Image (tube, grey):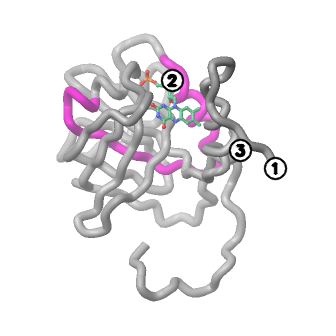
């Protein structure tokens, strides 16, 4: 058994040890304001079924965060296992007004918004911010779905687990269980 709490020598000790054991979907969060477009690798969870709402946690210092705060919108693109390089690219800063163009990230757009998403992903969600609050070293944004596109191809989701990328494994149940819509 290993225990860890964050300390002066490594303020991320607990995050590295135990938060990294929470398997997360890998997502790219997109945002735009004026002529500026950005995206950052991140993750997402749903927080309401009806209305459909998701939550993301963003660093206060990132360009994506600034654009979300200005536009009050963000996109979430859920990545599959062939998109790992995009996840690695979007996890770094880029020069220029348009990070999608700078890093050759394929853009999906919708007529109802200027917020870009990542074309070819498992699913793309566009959200308007309905709540924003500081949470430790991040800012929590809750977004209500204003549009979505789901790709019908069968993909293995890209996950983040134990500080590495991995692809999703196998079904362990045949039927969709009753009593929960997701
Ligand atoms: C696997 C992975 C997960 C990440 N998750 C988050 C996250 O949840 N929130 C966040 O603010 N940054 C996260 N990052 C870091 C951002 O993607 C990174 O800071 C990015 O450069 C921000 O870009 P921007 O400054 O152009 O917005 C993650 C990076 C990686 C590689």
> Closer to the camera, 18 or 22?
18
Residue at the spot 39% in from the left edge and 51% down from the top edge: 124
The residue where tag 3 is placed is 162
Nearest to the eye among marks 1 and 3: give it.
Answer: 1
Considering only order in the chain, which callout, 3 or 1, is on the residue closer to the N terminus?
A: 1
The residue where tag 1 is placed is 1
Residue 164 visible, this angle: no
From the viewer's perspective, is residue 72 above or below residue 7? below
> Closer to the camera, 111 or 1?
1
The residues bearing labels 3 and 2 have C-alpha atoms spaced at a distance of: 27 Å
Residue at the spot 28% in from the left edge and 37% down from the top edge: 133
Nearest to the eye among marks 3 and 2: give it.
Answer: 3
Question: Residue 140 location in percent, x, y?
Answer: 35, 40
Question: Residue 100 location in percent, x, y?
Answer: 43, 27
Outermost residue on the right side: it is 1
Considering only order in the chain, which callout, 2 or 3, is on the residue closer to the N terminus?
A: 2
Considering only order in the chain, which callout, 2 or 1, is on the residue closer to the N terminus?
A: 1
Dot 1 beta carbon under 8 Å from ligand 1: no
Question: Residue 134 location in percent, x, y?
Answer: 32, 33
Question: Residue 89 location in percent, x, y?
Answer: 57, 27
The residue where tag 2 is placed is 103
Dot 3 beta carbon under 8 Å from ligand 1: no
Q: Magenta segment, which residues? A: 68-93
The residues bearing labels 1 and 2 have C-alpha atoms spaced at a distance of: 42 Å
Secondary element type, mark 3: loop
Residue at the spot 48% in from the left edge and 16% down from the top edge: 94
């Amino acid at each position: 058994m290993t225990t860890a709490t964050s300390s002066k020598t490594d303020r991320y000790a607990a995050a590295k040890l135990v938060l990294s054991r929470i398997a997360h979907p890998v997502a790219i969060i997109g945002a735009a304001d004026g002529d500026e477009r950005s995206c950052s690798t991140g993750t997402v969870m749903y927080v309401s079924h009806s209305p459909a709402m998701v939550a993301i946690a963003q660093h206060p210092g990132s360009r994506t965060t600034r654009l979300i705060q200005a536009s009050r919108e963000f996109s979430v693109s859920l990545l599959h296992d062939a998109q790992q390089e995009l996840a690695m690219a979007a996890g770094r800063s880029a020069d220029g007004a348009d990070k999608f163009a700078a890093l050759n990230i394929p853009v999906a757009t919708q007529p109802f918004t200027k917020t870009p998403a990542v074309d070819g992903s498992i699913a793309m969600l566009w959200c308007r911010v309905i709540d924003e609050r500081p949470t430790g070293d991040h800012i929590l944004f809750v977004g209500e779905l204003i549009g979505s596109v789901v790709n019908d191809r069968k993909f293995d989701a890209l996950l983040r687990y134990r500080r590495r990328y991995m692809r999703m494994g196998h079904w362990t149940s045949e039927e969709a269980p009753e009593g929960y819509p997701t």
